Image (cartoon, rainbow, N blue to C red):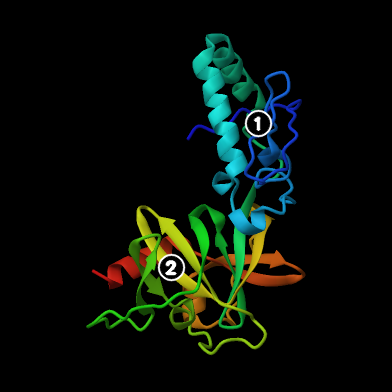
Amino acid sequence: MAEPMAEDDMQETARPGSGSDPVRLDGHIDDCWNRIGVRGDGSCPELQHHLRCLNCPTYASAARQQLDRIAASPEVAQEWMHSEVASAPPPHSAVALASALVVRVGGEWLAIATAVVQEVAENRAVHSLPHQRNPAISGVLNIRGALRICVSLAQLLHLPTTPTPGAGVPSLLVTTYEGQTLVFPVEQVAGVHRYATDALAPVPTTLAHAAIQYTRGMVEWRGQQIGLLDHELLFYVLNRSMT
């Protein structure tokens, strides 16, 4: 879906993320995703539930309204094109930011790029796969009517597999990369964290070898360094092990 137009003077009366259509005043749409969403300061409380603005009903509603405006008026289409060019960031922005979802696995806090996270689902039964030799492959489970491979990050990274006391009800992290969907059980979801891409710290040698292999770098979160998972390598290795 094409992204809605970003305008500084857009207005609305609906609460961001409420699922209700924003009320357009003078044909404008509020670009809350640029202010308090993943492109803004990340303060929108709905990010804890939707993870990305792309999953938010308010974002989808604004996109539909914008497409309706473009389809109804050639003048609006020209205005939108000029606005997109004018609002594009300069080629060399001061700080490049990225976002990651912070989760706890095996008592350790980890981060994974929000770009691959589809949703956080409730825990459910996992059905084992016969003749599966990879101990990290827990089995398959049903996600929205489709069977998905469930992978234990704790097993893969050689972390404790016993639940952390006080961690609460475990959740399922549904991720997709290059057409492949994998589900990772997690003990806790802390939320989305934004970080500067040039601020990644090297991985310390004190980590277990498996953790070092699948960690892209360290990001600072709440005063501590946590590992940012290398999702590209993670999916590549797991796909190879299942073929």
Callout 1: SS: loop
Q: Which image quadrant for residue 176?
A: bottom left
Please determine whether, in this image, residue 192 is positioned above or below residue 135: above
Measure the alpha-carbon separation of dots 1 and 2.
37 Å
Question: Which residue is depicted at the point 39% across and 72% down?
Answer: 150
Q: Residue furthest front?
A: 20
Q: Residue furthest top?
A: 75
Question: Which residue is depicted at the point 71% across and 66% down?
Answer: 221
Mark 1 is surrounded, within 10 Å at the Cα level, by few (under 14), some (14 to 19) or many (20 or more) other residues, namely: few
Of residues 169 and 190, the one drawn nearer to the viewer in this rendering: 169
- Dot 1 or dot 2: first in sequence order is 1
User: Label for residue 90?
Assistant: 1
Of residues 41 and 202, the one drawn nearer to the viewer in this rendering: 41
Which mark lies nearer to you, 1 or 2? 2
Please determine whether, in this image, residue 44 is positioned above or below residue 227: above
Q: Quadrant of the C terminus?
A: bottom left
- The residue singled out by tag 2 in the image is 183
